[in-house]
Amino acid sequence: MSKRFNVWLLMLVAVLLSRFIGMALFPFSDTTEPRYAEIARLMVETGDWITPWFEPGVPFWGKPPLSFWVQGLAIKAFGVTEFSLRFPSWLATLAMVWLVWRLALQIWSVQVARWSCLVFATMALTYISAGAVMTDAFLALGTTLALVSFCLVVAGEGGLWRWLFFLGIVIGLLSKGPLALVLIGIPIVLWLSLSWRGALNNLQRLPWRRGTLMTAVLVFPWYLLAELKTPGFLDYFIVGEHIRRFLDPGWVGDLYGSAHNQPKGMIWMFWLWASFPWGIVALVSLAVAWFRGKRRGIVSKTLSDPGASFLLVSALAPMLFFTLAGNTLWTYILPSLPFTAILIGRWASECQSFRLARVRGGLVALVPVLLTVFVGLTATGWQSLKTEKELVGYYQLTRTADDSPLIYLDDLPFSARFYSGGTALEETESDLSSLQSAETYQHLYVAVPRSWPKENVAGFATSARKVMENRRYQLLVIAGMRDDQPSVLDANGVRLSDI
């Protein structure tokens, strides 16, 4: 094993290990992570592995269940922790790193494969999603597996790769739905349209009939059971999430939040963010070469190379599809990054300039170092997040059996739901007055906006006192008995103040 290989492997392991460690130190911050984490927790708690539940009694129709299944299995294996729920995404990213290695090695060389893995692992979105509770890592795993398998089979590989193409489709359909077919189909159709006649002959190497049957057997039963269990799922998920959301920037049919209204074409700006810092550096380098008169060489070299052209259309597919969409997020770029990374990895491996060679090492470390510092600041309390972990923890340590559940006035954050194990409540001010009048609890624990001045707190309840606060809320303790007086009960449970 060469010294150069040792250095490359150590760098890759350090990057992946830094994300692995950070998963246990960083609390869930509203809204995405705790929302999906709570859905997975409810799946385990209820034992319902067919329908993900947004909250008890409200089915979650926004995503298929694959990510919740693996997160639920992680909960069963490691308990309800941040690490256990993030671990499946880290494994999915690890699998994508290996697929990047395998494809880059097939198309070019070991040196390109090494740099491609480093580039992919240290892109901003890859590094963040590797330790996050999201569905996007599983969609990207499915599309990457399918496209890498397709490319390898067309290049002459056989055996298991012929079936992994269809397994990638299955993973995509069970993690995000029909969108996976689009993101897999666009690059294949575009690439074949470039008249790679030799590739057309090798398409017969894929077991189309048996592979399609396998896909149907693994995917359709869940879709059917989901519709039978909660009628309306297919209309919302297929028509609403995949057609109305795409066509209507202000779509108001979202049952679980609000549409992400963005200017059309914003997906290209998201690509710069997601691929940071590599995308920006590569584009600058490409622009310099272009204006130095090398444009014809760049275009002809890419179009004449079947491998390079396949990587290009695979990298561009998500942006091409979402260009006209009004509801977009930067996480939609993730399926593009494995193929973008191989293209940039080739450039990085060919850098001859001493300055560029030194810059490469800094780019590898940039995102991991920045996020590790951020995680460290958060873990030590220097940086506050939009999370209710500390507030919920304080309540759980100080409450007694006669006190109320933790109550959030008018708005219950997802992180409060998760960290309270689903016991935190959302109540209005009139509901709180009813609870006080009912004299059910010794004390009411109520979280109200931190921005409330002392006058508002005093007017809210005469006995209200603030016991702690975080970035968004202040926790009040309010006497729950009549006249704001604590209750003393005799042996028969009769309140002494009533005798």
Image: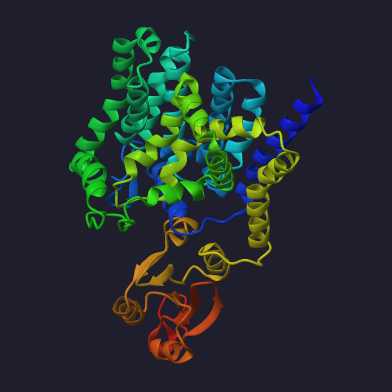
* 272 or 225, nearer to the observer: 272
Residue 170 image point, x, y percent: 36, 26
Horizontal side, residue 190 vs residue 154: left or right:
left
Residue 95 image point, x, y percent: 55, 29
**Number of residue marks:** 0
Quarter containing the N terminus:
top right
Horizontal side, residue 201 vs residue 353: left or right:
left
Relative to 464, is 30 above or below?
above
* 7 or 85, nearer to the observer: 7
Residue 40 can be seen in this image: no
Q: Residue at position x 49%, y 10% from top?
A: 157
Q: Residue at position x 27%, y 26% from top?
A: 221
Relative to 191, is 318 above or below?
below
Relative to 4, is 448 above or below?
below
Residue 455 can be seen in this image: yes
Horizontal side, residue 239 vs residue 479: left or right:
left
Furthest-front residue in view?
Answer: 293
Horizontal side, residue 212 vs residue 461: left or right:
left
Q: Residue at position x 60%, y 47% from top?
A: 23
Instruction: Indicate how the structure is coloured in the image.
Output: rainbow
Furthest-right residue in view?
Answer: 3
Relative to 63, is 187 above or below?
above
Residue 31 image point, x, y percent: 43, 58
Quarter containing the C terminus:
bottom left
Residue 122 image point, x, y percent: 61, 42
* 125 or 18, nearer to the observer: 125
